[in-house]
Image: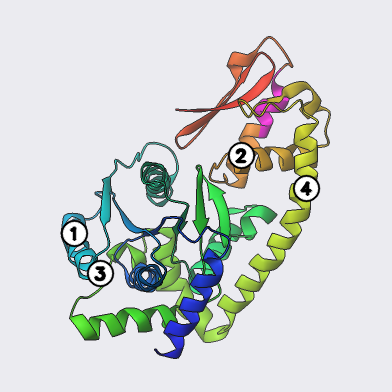
Amino acid sequence: MDASYSNLNALLNKALEPLGSEAPIAVALSGGADSVALALVAAEHCADTKRPLYFFHIHHGLMAQADAWVGHLQQFSQELKIPLQVRYVQVDLTAGLGVEGAARDARYTALAQLCREHGVAALLLAHHRQDQAETVLLRLLRGTGVSGLAAMQADVQRSGMRLLRPWLEVERAELLAVAHAFEQRTGWTAVQDPSNTDPKYARGALRSALAPVLNTYWPAWCQTLVRHARQAGEANEVLAEVAALDLAALNFKPEDQSFSLLPWRALSAARQALVVRHWLQEQGVAMPGERRLADLLRQLRQLHALGHDRELLWQHGSVAVRCKQGRVVLSSG
């Protein structure tokens, strides 16, 4: 076992420690080298521990190769003797989230459904150091706040499922080494998604145009941005404690996750924004950019506490914020 595999395996074992020893887990398997490496390490872990394991693949239908990828991944899962569950989704390109955002929204919704259907305790994601650094940079450019700059979390709840990212501070080269070793042994190759470097997508543009410049002039940019994410995460913990106290003081009702508009309007503008971000995040909503959030805050501030509830309708992807009888609620569609 080489050093890369040993390190990845140790980090995966550490991430799974809080789970029961027999709790089923799943890998979000796109078919790219990163997720393939995670699938390989997870398969060996589960073979050793007898823990149930699934591979989940989401078919977005956005690429001409999508059908071929399904067949290719079926071969991979058969080789490892791990069940592959494929979910076909429709990406809503009219939701105002862009192609990447809409695809991500559809993907996580489908993954959450699969987790519920199969009783999965945690879904493993193969995000690594470069992914984390890219996320920090993209969120900075979109104008997200401290919570956005904290980027991806190693252990987080989203849409009713537990997401584990055991390799957030690992160089991608370690993942590629594992995938390459499997290719050398079996001849099976990971898929290549052309959108990953397509400049018409934000992340593709970063990888194809911006990253080479950063690598030349600031070669440690990934490590630096990951450190910023860690520091922002620590600051965000303090802010989350303040926001949670404020939310509780807004006559928050756990049964429908709603809060009262009138006491919210008595908060300072900064704490109004903070508690709304916290409220959205706690319900698993992808954090909106500054402009979208400002629009929601503007509408909430303009509403009367009672009587004109129908004036508010803020749509964000597959969810909407409305006001009913002086209470702010989140609904689907």
Along the viewing direction, whichever of 324 and 41 lies nearer the viewer? 41
| Residue that label 2 marks | 280
Using the image, tell me which numbered label, if any, was put on residue 241.
Answer: 4
Q: Are marks 2 and 3 in contact (CB under 8 Å)?
A: no
Where disc 3 sits, the SS reads helix
* x and y, in percent, of residue 88 in the image: 26, 45
Q: Is residue 80 visible to us here? A: yes
Segment tinted magenta in the rendering: 297-303
Say which label, 3 or 1, has the lower sequence index: 1
Say which label, 2 or 3, has the lower sequence index: 3
* x and y, in percent, of residue 123 in the image: 44, 56
- Residue in view at x 18 percent, y 80 percent: 187
Query: Label 2 amino acid?
Result: Leu
Q: Nearer the viewer, mark 2 or mark 3?
A: 3
Q: CA distance from mark 1 to mark 2?
A: 35 Å
Q: CA distance from mark 4 to mark 1?
A: 46 Å
Along the viewing direction, whichever of 74 and 220 lies nearer the viewer? 74
Using the image, tell me which numbered label, if any, was put on residue 80.
Answer: 3
Along the viewing direction, whichever of 64 and 302 lies nearer the viewer? 64
Residue at far bottom of view: 2
